[in-house]
Image (cartoon, rainbow, N blue to C red):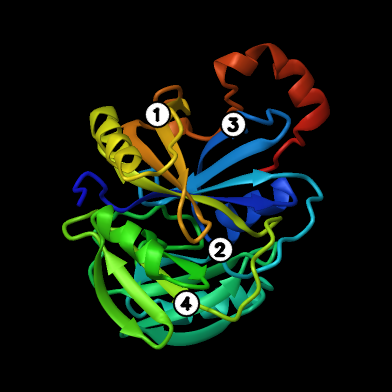
Amino acid sequence: MLDQIKGLHHVTSLASDAQQNNDFFTKTLGLRRVKKTVNFDAPEVYHLYYGDEMGTPGTVMTYFPFQRARRGRPGTGEVGITQFSVPQGSLGFWTDRLSTMGVKGLSEDTAFGENRLRFQGPDGDGFALVEVAEDGRAPWVTDTVSADVAIRGFHSARMRLRDRGASAELLRFMGYEKQATEGDLTRYAVPGGNDARVIEIEELPGAAPSEQGAGSVHHIAFAVDDRERQLEVRKALMDTGYQVTPVIDRDYFWAIYFRSPGGVLFEVATNEPGFDRDEEPAHLGERLRIPAQHAHLRDILEQRYLPRLHD
């Protein structure tokens, strides 16, 4: 069993419109845009990062907004719901706010003893706010979202799978322990991990497979402290039979990728070097940052492919 993984690092999804996506996360949910860059493999597409003040691992939601992309179809083999932590007693504020702002899919329920507000993103993305009694992370606050209600970061990610068996074994190998089961939901957590240490599996044996598109989660990333720990995880996964990519420099972290048995793409990302490696903390996410290999494309990208974002 591994002990290097601390919980979630980030969650990356697909969108159909960059401005709409930016407005939803910064204006509706009150997160900070901590980085404005481009997709390494498709530099004509933005890669936008939202989180707390510094983009702390375990708080960062990222998006590839492919303009006018078709909407994905929910199903099995994907992360169906990305869940954020909010203070206890704050769901009334969020229900009123999201309703007033026209957010769709609002519904309240309880899972594992925690109150939850489910809602949809602009492309039908599955989200939930979960009330947490003790979450010491300092939130990003805005003029309309105060510290006593603001999102702290991720609570968990919920995977929808036809069968949880093999994926549950993988999670246990990665250091997760089973906490509880309610109906078709099973919760796992990393003992002593970060504040985003929970993964849930929703077992849906009769459901159709998902089709990825706008509103779909592309991958989930798990956090390790540094490159040394990452290499240890990579070797252990490969020794177990997983096909793992070489280490890839993503400018703000190093990444490895592999496909989980249930079909969800997993990443293991380092907590180093962080989002302030090329911008001062007070100005994170303001300027378009282009990876060195695409720097020569800046003019054409800005003029032809990347719509200007209005904050």
Between discs 4 and 2, the one toward the N terminus: 2
Picture quarter containing residue 256?
A: top left
What whole-number distance in Å separates the C-alpha atoms at marks 3 and 1? 13 Å
What whole-number distance in Å separates the C-alpha atoms at marks 1 and 2? 34 Å
SS state under label 2: loop
Q: From the viewer's perspective, tell me whether residue 205 is left or right of residue 186.
A: right
Say which residue label 2 marks.
77
Numbered label tally = 4
Between discs 3 and 2, the one toward the N terminus: 3
Say which residue label 1 marks.
276
SS state under label 1: loop
Q: Position of residue 110 (x, y in %)?
A: 40, 86
Picture quarter containing residue 272?
A: top left
- The three-letter amino acid code for the residue at tag 3 is Thr
Q: Residue at x 46, y 75 (%)?
A: 202
Q: From the viewer's perspective, tell me whether residue 25 is left or right of residue 177.
A: right
Q: Position of residue 66 (x, y in %)?
A: 74, 44
- The three-letter amino acid code for the residue at tag 1 is Asp
Say which residue label 4 marks.
203
SS state under label 4: strand
Q: Position of residue 116 (x, y in %)?
A: 43, 80
Say which residue label 3 marks.
37
Between discs 1 and 2, the one toward the N terminus: 2
Q: Count neighbours of disc 3 (C-alpha within 10 A) and say few if under 14, some if 14 to 19, many if 20 or more.
A: many
Relative height, residue 112 to residue 228 (above, below): below
- The three-letter amino acid code for the residue at tag 4 is Glu
| Residue 117 shows in this picture | yes
Q: What quarter of the picture does the C terminus occupy? A: top right
SS state under label 3: strand
Front one among 230 and 294: 230
